[in-house]
Image (spheres, grey):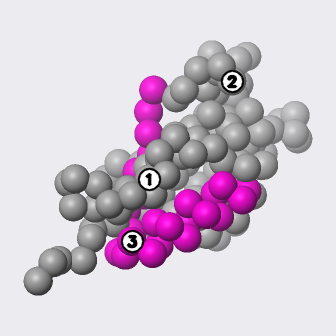
Amino acid sequence: MTTAPEPAKISPYLTVNGASDAIALYQKVFGAKENARMMAQDGKRLMHADLTINGGRVLLSDEFAEFDGGSAPLPDRKSPVSVAVSYDSPTEVDATFARAIEAGCKSELDPHDAFFGSRFAMLNDPFGHRWMLVAPLPQQA
């Protein structure tokens, strides 16, 4: 286990079915760095994991119904919460989106130049979580 970065003021905590697989996906798509991983007593599920994604922190665990913990998103329903990842350039949005689709994520909104002055895209990962990718558009002269 490595020392975790300074905690962000707010960090999403995702509950998933298959936390180890989710971490592998987030590493491939977002370049996530794993800061900590704590296995559950059953040796199969993750009790807690701490990731750094693009300078921010995402925490996650497997579902633990026996502890009345959080529930993973249902397969037939969209997550009621989105995780926004901000980038410095529109090309980063496009590249991340392409990696995500290649890794099995589903497009909800393809990358486009949005009316609010940003490159924007939305996708759903195979674990039921929605991700928003955003970067400022260059200023028009």
The location of residue 17, given as percent across then percent down, is 74, 33
Q: CA distance from mark 1 to mark 2?
A: 21 Å
Q: Which residue is mark 3?
A: 90
Residue under the point 47% across and 73% down? 92
- Numbered mark located on residue 121 in the image: 1
Give the x, y percent position of residue 138: 24, 77
Residue occupying the point 87% across, 34% down? 42
Extreme-bottom residue of the structure: 141
User: Where does the magenta region start and end?
Assistant: 80-103
Q: Is the C terminus in the top left, top right, bottom left or bottom right quadrant?
A: bottom left
Above or below for 67 versus 54: above
Q: Residues within 10 Å of mark 1 (few under 14, many from 20)?
A: many
The kind of residue on which mark 2 rests is: Pro
Q: Quadrant of residue 97?
A: bottom right
Question: Count of labels shown?
Answer: 3
Q: Secondary structure at mark 2?
A: loop
- 110 or 11, which is in the foreground? 110
Q: Which mark is residue 75?
A: 2
- Secondary structure at numbered mark 3: helix
The answer to whether residue 48 is visible is no
Say if 32 sits above or below 45 in the image.
below
Question: What SS does tag 1 mark?
Answer: strand
Residue at figure coordinates x 20%, y 54% from the top left:
116
Q: Is residue 136 left or right of residue 6?
A: left
Q: Is there a contact, CB below 8 Å, between mark 1 and mark 2?
A: no
Would residue 83 be found to the left or right of residue 43 on screen? left
